[in-house]
Amino acid sequence: MNNDITYYAKKRQSVKAYDSSKKISAENIEKIKELLRYSPSSVNAQPWHFVIASTEEGKNRIAKATDVLYPFNSNSIREASHVVVFASRLDTPEEYLQSLLAQEEKDGRFDADPEVFKAKMDGGRKMFINVHKEKFNDVPHWLAKQVYLNLGHFLLGVSALGIDSTPMEGVDLDTLDKEFGLREKGFSSICVVPLGYSDAENDFNALLPKSRLPYSDILTEV
C-alpha cells in the first residue's frame, strides 16, 4: 500500500463501466462502513443516513431513480459490486441533539467534567444550528454540506482501499426518497455512489488523463 495520500487523490477516477464479476470483500465492506461513520462534520452533527445495496434486488431499487431521466447511469449502478445512497437530515430536532450528546457522553467525550463539558457542547452545537436557522435560513442546505464532507472523505478513502467509485448526482432524488421512505425518517437523498472495480476495456475514462486547473488559478499563498 502506498503511504502517499496524494497518490490516491491522483489515481482515483469516476468509473464509467464496472466489472460485475469482481466483488468487494467482506473485510473491505466493513472498512467502507467505518469510512462513512467516522467522517468529520461541523459540530459533530453527523446529519446523515446511508443505504448500501449489494444484491441485484437492492441495486435495481436504486436504479429506479436513473432508469427514466438518467439511463446513462443505470448500468453502473447495476454492474457495480455495491452502491451507496447518501442522504441528509432535513432538520435537527431536540430529540436528535440529545441522542448526539448521549453518544458523546458514552464515548467519553465529557469525562474531564461531565456536566460542564456536556453543557458547553450542547450550547455550542445549538449556537451554530441557530445561526443557520435564524440568520441564513438554510438548515437543510447546511446539513447537506456536512454530508458532502463525508462524501469527499469517502471517495478518497475507498481509493486508498483500491476500490473504484462514481459519485452521481444524476439520479431522481424524489424517486429514491420514496423507494426507501427517507422523508418519513427525516432525511432526503443527495447522491448515489456505485463502488467496485473498473471494467477497464469498456471504461473510456480509465484511458484519459486527469485534468485540473493550475495552482496559479486556484491557490493564493500569503
Image: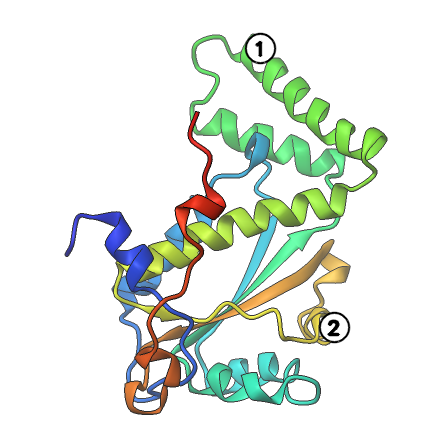
Q: Which quadrant: the N terminus? A: bottom left
Q: Which residue does the image show at 46% across and 52% down from the upper left?
A: 152
Give amino acid for label 1.
Answer: Glu
Going from N to C along the chain, the mark reached first, 2 or 1, is 1
Tell which residue pokes out farthest to the left in this image. 1
**Circle 2 or circle 1, nearest the eye:** 2
Q: Which residue does the image show at 68% across and 18% down from the upper left?
A: 123
Give amino acid for label 2.
Answer: Lys
Q: Which residue does the image show at 24% across and 55% down from the upper left?
A: 7
Left or right placement of residue 173 versus residue 36 in this view: right
SS type, badge 1: helix
SS type, badge 2: helix
Please give the label number shown on residue 178: 2
Callout 2 touching callout 1 (CB < 8 Å): no
Left or right placement of residue 185 versus residue 212 in this view: right
Q: Residues within 10 Å of mark 2 (few under 14, many from 20)?
A: some
Note whether 215 is above or below 135 in the view shown: below
Place of residue 16 in the rendered image (x, y in percent of width and height, measured from the top left): 43, 81
Left or right placement of residue 1 versus residue 91 in this view: left
The front one of 110 and 188 is 188
The front one of 179 and 9 is 9
What residue is disc 1 on? 115
Place of residue 66 in the rendered image (x, y in percent of width and height, measured from the top left): 63, 83
Q: Which residue does the image show at 71% across and 22% down from the upper left?
A: 127
